[in-house]
Amino acid sequence: MGNLIQLLPDHIANQIAAGEVIQRPASAVKELLENATDAGATQIQLIVSEGGKSLIQVIDNGKGMSETDARMAFERHATSKIRQIDDLFRINTMGFRGEALASIAAVAQVELKTRREEDELGTRLEIENSKIIVQEPCACAVGTQISMKNLFFSVPARRNFLKNNAVEMRHIIDEFMRVALAFPALAFNLTSNGQEVFHLEPGSHKQRIIQLLGNAYQTKLVSVKEETDYMNIHGLVGKPETARKTRGDQYFFVNNRFIKSAYLNHAVNTAFDNLLPKDSFPTYILYIDLDPAQVDINVHPTKQEIKFEDEKIIYAFVQAAVKHALAQFSVAPSLDFSLNAGIQQLDAINRPFTEEKKEATASSSLYQTFSKKNQAHFIEKTEDASLKHWKEFFTPANSEATQSSVASTTPLWQKENTVAKADSGIQIIYEIPFVQLHQTYLLATTRDGFIVIHQQLAHERILYEKYGQAAHGHQMATQKSLFPVSLTLAPADAALLNDLLPDLAQIGYQIEKNDQHEFVIQGIPADILPGNEQNAIELLLEQFKHFSSEIQFSKREKIIRCMARQQAIKAGRTLTSREMHQLVEELFTCNSPNISPSGAATYLLFNGDYLTRMFGK
């Protein structure tokens, strides 16, 4: 029997390494943009087509490479940043592992043009499947142009796992924004399918943030700046009114590297304690500078998760810095002492105070009590007629009168249908009033027991089936907005909403795109109460992005589930008798009344036999 273990061929080893580094087009964008910043570029241009699947091109005016360096850059473990092991613990640059270009060359067709300032001619390379096909001198500008075409063309199985162009473009925008926020002194440009998405001029951190997040943030950001011997922190946090239902506008940078840290995110959230609603997320863009030896950035292939030598110090420092900034700028709950315009319309202000009224007021015992010296505490005993009949309050009302009044107010649909027989076989007696427990559960009497219905889960089932019918052919009616609402979103959220517009139109939303990041809500589904359109869309985007399920639902299915969850009557809301009856009736006309869209039970049935056994009879 021969030897079984053998070395992988280079091109396969490169493709395996590419799986760690290049997971989707946005991963390649991140690596190429970071290489451009390391090259000392002042202008960086990103050009993509079809969500990066057919083309990703980065053009920079950095220092360029020699002919030998251009070839070496595509070898595995090739890097200009590390000479000895200690360098791994003093990393100040972005791309340092020497895997990025080798990984890209393993899964795409790559063309590189590069020239140094001291060279007359540059170098052009064409690479496919990790092999250099063409190497020749060329005329080009100082700097580097690298084009990546047909991502995963050599690994069709990987290409099949890519999402649609709009989804991949959202991820590219995310990576572009992170690098652009880390380096505000550099000019950046992003073009997608021939259309310019971003044109960012060099400026301060605040200018760059406003360029990316929108002018609405101009007066809604608070500066954070704290310096110590151990570390420095600076940046901006949004005032409470900028908090959103989506987590999008939250950025941490450590030594100019974007990181994800639930631990530090918790530090910022606690600094906002009692300033934000429970389901809102603060906006922040914070830059932490500390000795690279205190940070390990090699714990994750994407380098977005890092380890601090002393996490507790960082946590306390971030929390204190944000709290100090909010306190310094008086961002705290406050009483509004501005005069309400409605007060001016009250009778007490509008009507003249006549002499007769003055005399009547002055002669009253209350006026006398307060106008005499040392009498403010004195109240005369009076026989108040309104208190004479207090006992009548506790006597039961005439039962016949009460019944007749109830009967007169009972809707016809209740009188005619005292017993509802659902397809499930449950017979609910409508003539016996329903009871709401803890503003969450509805108790109804059945022919041989009773039923407990969870109002929120039941309503989710009702809405899920209603929106499901609308999404699959029976388009819902739209109520036009008398005053259309404008909605400005972060670029990634704008790209997501743009992708969802056709599906939202099917369930009754009429939303038009104004420009790259602004939308106008012209109409909403007919059964939704107007007045909360902006929050509804933001919450929908939040739920859509963070929809957690083991099953890969379609885009339309996700929207239906999100809408049902968002618009359902929440636990904790008091329902009228009519609302309770309507909810129960609609539930038992559903195809699957017994389970919610998430799979939870909508009701529990207690029949007579079960109740008898409970009492040991």
Image (cartoon, rainbow, N blue to C red):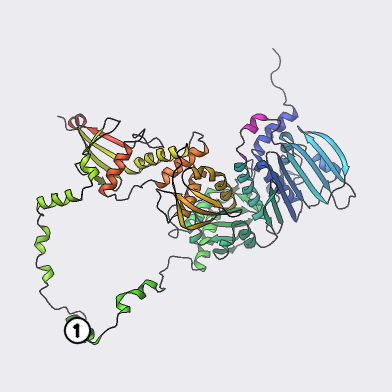
Tell me if residue 340 can be seen: no
Q: Nearer the viewer, residue 139 or 281?
A: 139
Across and down, in percent, residue 458 comes to 34, 40
**Left or right, residue 483 beside residue 434:** right
Q: Is residue 457 above or below residue 357?
A: above
Tell me which amino acid carries mark 1: Ala
Query: What secondary structure is marked by label 1?
Result: helix
In reply to whether residue 290 is colored magenta, the answer given is: no
Looking at the image, which residue is at 72% across and 39% down? Answer: 99
Residues rendered magenta in the picture = 150-164
Across and down, in percent, residue 383 comes to 10, 74
Farthest right residue in view: 120
Looking at the image, which residue is at 33% across and 36% down? Answer: 589
Quadrant location of the N terminus in the rendered image: top right
Question: Which quadrant of the view contains residue 105?
Answer: top right
Farthest top residue in view: 1
Q: Nearer the viewer, residue 600 or 515?
A: 515
The residue pinned by badge 1 equals 360
Q: Nearer the viewer, residue 445 or 310?
A: 445
Across and down, in percent, residue 58 comes to 74, 47
